[in-house]
Image (tube, grey):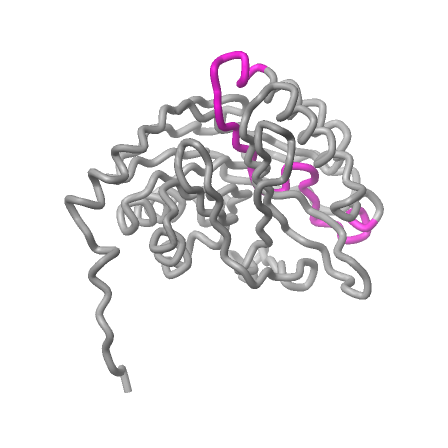
Amino acid sequence: MRAALLQLTSSDDPHSNLRIISDLLRMAAADGAELVLTPEVTNCVSNSRTHQRHVLCQEADDPTLDALRNDAARLGVWLSIGSLALKAEPPEARFLNRGFLIGPDGMIAARYDKLHMFDVQVTETETYRESDGFKPGQTAVTCETPFGVIGMSICYDVRFPYLYRALAQAGAEIMIVPAAFSPATGPMHWNPLLRARAIETGSYVLAAAQGGQHSATRGRARTTHGHSLAVSPWGEILLDAGQMSGIHMVDVDRTKVATARHKVPSLQHDMSFTGPA
């Protein structure tokens, strides 16, 4: 199976972002991609809650979701929309950070709300309180596809290995980790975390990322780490996109999942224990 990771530098304008994504999706499909993956907050990268309230929509009315579903059906590809920033149903005032897996019929095969919120102070000047603006999800999600079971996650989730173990033990063979990773932590943490999740579970890890300086019409502009990554079930880095926006292709061989898990069957070796006190 050929997968295309789209590395983006999304702005805070969903309409202009959609034009770029649709063009890249069309080109990836023409190059033989069967699965196309976009990063976290594909539709809008913004630090301004006021701007988000102005431009974001609920799922049923979101033009990005509607257009990309149509594109997937027209091109006959599976599409992982890493996540969209969406308005929640009232009375919830916070937004949703929701990923979608779209089938080649254009139907939503799975949706996943990011579980772990990025509430950190990574430097003296760089602080994030994602839970102030976004409602966390409560459910882990897998989805059966013709090329393997996909386990869904988003960005900060990658720091919580129990999630990926649960996904793998539920049958997931490909872990998707769309991200808008901080450049303060990315150089040291991004590659090792993704490789660890692949090695621990004997799974492919496909991580489409936002990268670069993001244009903002309101509020403080963001910078993200980039380096969309694909990792084999044995922990080999198959693709590192660096800071290059665009389409990055990788081949996925499902049989390598079974091979890695046969060599190191750690998913079957859970032990009960007591403590620590």
Q: Is residue 77 left or right of residue 20?
A: left
Given the current orientation, which residue lies at the most extreme left position? Answer: 263
Q: Which residues are magenta?
A: 27-53
Given the current orientation, which residue lies at the most extreme right position? Answer: 54
Q: Quadrant of residue 100?
A: top right
**Residue 137 sits inside the magenta stretch:** no
Q: Quadrant of residue 272?
A: bottom left
The answer to which of 217 and 140 lies nearer the viewer is 140
Which residue shows up at 43% across the image and 32% down it?
146
Tell me the quadrant of the picture where the C terminus can be found. Answer: bottom left
Q: Is residue 160 left or right of residue 65?
A: left
Q: Looking at the image, can residue 155 be seen?
A: yes
Q: Quadrant of residue 261?
A: top left
The answer to which of 237 and 59 lies nearer the viewer is 59
Q: Measured from the top left, where is residue 233 in percent x and y?
A: 28, 39
**How many numbered markers are drawn?**
0
Q: Measured from the top left, where is residue 190 in percent x and y?
A: 40, 44
Q: Looking at the image, can residue 121 be seen?
A: no
The answer to which of 118 and 143 lies nearer the viewer is 143
Image vertical order of residue 29 relative to residue 265, above or below: above
Given the current orientation, which residue lies at the most extreme top position? Answer: 30
Which residue shows up at 78% across the image and 58% down it?
89
Q: Measured from the top left, where is residue 67 in percent x and y?
A: 73, 29
Which residue shows up at 71% across the image and 23% down it?
19
Q: Is residue 242 left or right of residue 139?
A: left
Image vertical order of residue 45 relative to residue 25, above or below: below
Image vertical order of residue 274 relative to residue 202, above or below: below
Q: Measured from the top left, where is residue 234 in percent x and y?
A: 24, 39
Tell me the quadrant of the picture where the N terminus can be found. Answer: top left
Q: Is residue 158 left or right of residue 28?
A: left
The answer to which of 219 and 63 lies nearer the viewer is 63
Which residue shows up at 54% across the image and 29% down it?
78
